[in-house]
Image: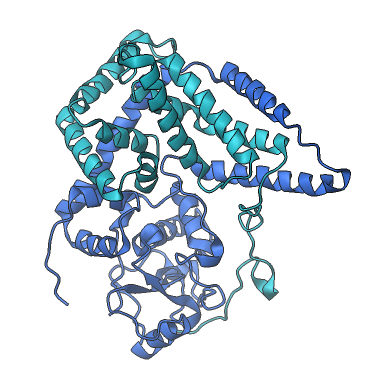
Chain colours: A blue, B cyan
């Protein structure tokens, strides 16, 4: 299908960078960005303007802020006063239950804060309805018998591993997609062939371009990063494979030290969409 | 290609729980009734968000003392919110929304006259001496140049940019200000254009 090539407007680029663009428009924008260097440059430029502003603002304003300890103590007193307005004594038998709830609440809060301590932090996504990682019962990941010596240095221009149409459709069916829309998915090797991943149903999953927080671009960037790390001896082959198979989003966060996909990875597309 | 058989991912073998720390977290819907736990939670949120909130309040035109008052009010309101078992989804967003509303109220109360000096905070009043005066001045001047470029914009555009600079996503900004995502995007486009001019 031919799509009229229109540049992505600044407003949409900004929304895209914060993962807030509605799905249909995000899909179109990604397709365009993958082919338009001018728009990619504009995206980077817009983000860097805001980052620069944010940094200048912090370094200018932070020295103005009063120390936190007195404010903290003040808040503690105010909170204590507010608590005593309604003492809320609990009957003896509920105490263990309440304590357990309290411990869990504090634990949850700690996680929420850790997630939010970086700019642009996102609340955690429940793993049950995550679409950014495959269902482990369908796609546990599968490696073939190649070793590090077979894989390093990476062979240039070996091209993507071919997946037969029959196998592709079987994978789509297994994942509950009987009639896949062309160009809406990448048929992704969970462990990529260049890291010893097998071309088998256990290692293939339809990675949607929709729901773009953690998209194919980010995963491709991670695969390249892990391949470098593996060939340079920073990680073992099996560790790289396990990282991708267990939770590639967590691996991305670890290896790029970023809570969310980096802007420059949004339009990083190595593998072709399935069609 | 010959497969060596599915290698098992740690934690998934034999149907063992895959639960990471997140899966073990508390049910977010469970109302927190214990004041002590809520108190600790509020303190943690205070530690994590006080500075961004204060910066935001300075940038909407409050003087430092007023900004500090509003921040206190905000986190006390957070305590009451949690103690009553109210929804706890996206608490940082809740904090900014409340700070924004209380901040504007405060600004109306103290009047523009007092607030004006702190339109974007006055970096020259800095009490902190970690930077030498010259470096501080350079940073201050750069920030002032940007602020000067932004001054011509509608206030809403500046609110959007400020919230983005403090790390909110556009969706959260839309909620905080009670406007549509499209309006946020338009505001940000105008703000970015201004910043680009100032940067030249």
Residue A221 in view? no
Residue B191: quarter of image:
top left
Name the residue located 14 percent from the left edge and 52 percent from the top edge: A38
Left or right: A88 in relation to B63: right
In the depicted structure, whether residue A198 falls above or below residue B75: below
Left or right: B195 in relation to A259: left
Residue B130 vs residue B7, the one in the foreground: B130
Residue A272 vs residue B58, the one in the foreground: B58
Q: Position of residue B124 (x, y in %)?
A: 33, 10
Tell which residue pokes out farthest to the right in this image.
A92
Q: Position of residue B34 (x, y in %)?
A: 72, 40
Residue B161: quarter of image:
top left
Name the residue located 65 percent from the left edge and 39 percent from the top edge: B83
Residue A75: quarter of image:
top right
Numbered disc total: 0
Name the residue located 42 percent from the left edge and 16 percent from the top edge: B64
Q: Position of residue A206 (x, y in %)?
A: 40, 75
In the depicted structure, whether residue B167 falls above or below residue A20: above
Name the residue located 40 percent from the left edge and 69 percent from the top edge: A194
Residue A128 in view? yes
Q: Position of residue B144 (x, y in %)?
A: 25, 19
Where does the C terminus of chain A fall, quadrant-wise? Answer: bottom left
Where does the N terminus of chain A fall, quadrant-wise? Answer: bottom left
């Amino acid at each position: 299908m031919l799509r009229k090539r229109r540049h992505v407007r600044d407003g949409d680029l900004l929304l895209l960078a914060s993962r807030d663009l509605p799905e249909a428009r995000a899909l179109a924008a990604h397709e365009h960005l993958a082919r338009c260097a001018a728009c990619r440059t504009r995206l980077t430029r817009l983000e860097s303007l805001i980052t620069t502003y944010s940094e200048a603002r912090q370094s200018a304003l932070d020295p103005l802020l009063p120390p936190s300890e007195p404010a903290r103590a003040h808040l503690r007193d105010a909170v204590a006063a507010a608590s005593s307005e309604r003492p809320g004594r609990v009957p003896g038998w509920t105490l263990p239950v309440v304590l357990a709830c309290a411990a869990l609440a504090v634990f949850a809060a700690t996680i929420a804060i850790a997630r939010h301590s970086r700019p642009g932090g996102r609340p955690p996504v429940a793993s049950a309805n995550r679409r950014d990682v495959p269902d482990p019962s369908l796609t546990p990941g599968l490696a073939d018998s190649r070793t590090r010596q077979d894989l390093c240095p990476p062979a240039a221009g070996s091209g993507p591993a071919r997946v037969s149409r029959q196998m592709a459709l079987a994978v789509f069916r297994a994942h509950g997609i009987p009639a896949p829309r062309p160009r809406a998915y990448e048929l992704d090797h969970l462990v990529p062939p260049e890291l010893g991943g097998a071309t088998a149903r256990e290692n293939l999953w339809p990675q949607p371009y929709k729901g773009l927080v953690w998209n194919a671009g980010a995963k491709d960037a991670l695969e390249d990063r892990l391949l470098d790390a593996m060939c340079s001896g920073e990680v073992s082959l099996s560790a790289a494979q396990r990282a991708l198979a267990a939770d590639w989003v967590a691996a991305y966060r670890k290896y790029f030290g970023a809570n969310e996909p980096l802007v420059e990875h949004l339009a990083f597309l190595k593998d072709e969409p399935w069609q | 290609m010959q497969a060596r058989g599915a290698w098992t991912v740690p934690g998934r073998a034999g149907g063992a729980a895959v639960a990471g720390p997140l899966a073990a977290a508390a049910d977010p819907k469970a109302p927190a009734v214990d004041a002590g736990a809520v108190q600790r939670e509020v303190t943690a949120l205070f530690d994590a968000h006080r500075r961004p909130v204060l910066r935001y309040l300075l940038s909407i035109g409050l003087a430092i003392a007023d900004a500090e008052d509003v921040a206190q009010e905000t986190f006390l309101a957070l305590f009451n919110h949690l103690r009553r078992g109210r929804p706890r989804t996206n608490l940082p967003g809740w904090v900014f929304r409340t700070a924004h509303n209380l901040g504007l109220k405060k600004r109306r109360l103290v009047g523009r006259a007092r607030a004006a000096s702190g339109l974007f905070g006055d970096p020259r009043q800095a009490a902190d001496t970690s930077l030498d005066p010259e470096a501080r001045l350079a940073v201050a001047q750069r920030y002032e140049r940007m602020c000067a470029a932004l001054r011509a914009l509608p206030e809403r555009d500046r609110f959007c940019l400020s919230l983005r600079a403090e790390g909110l996503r556009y969706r959260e900004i839309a909620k905080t200000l009670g406007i549509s995502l499209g309006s946020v995007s338009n505001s940000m486009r105008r703000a970015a254009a201004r910043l680009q001019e100032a940067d030249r």
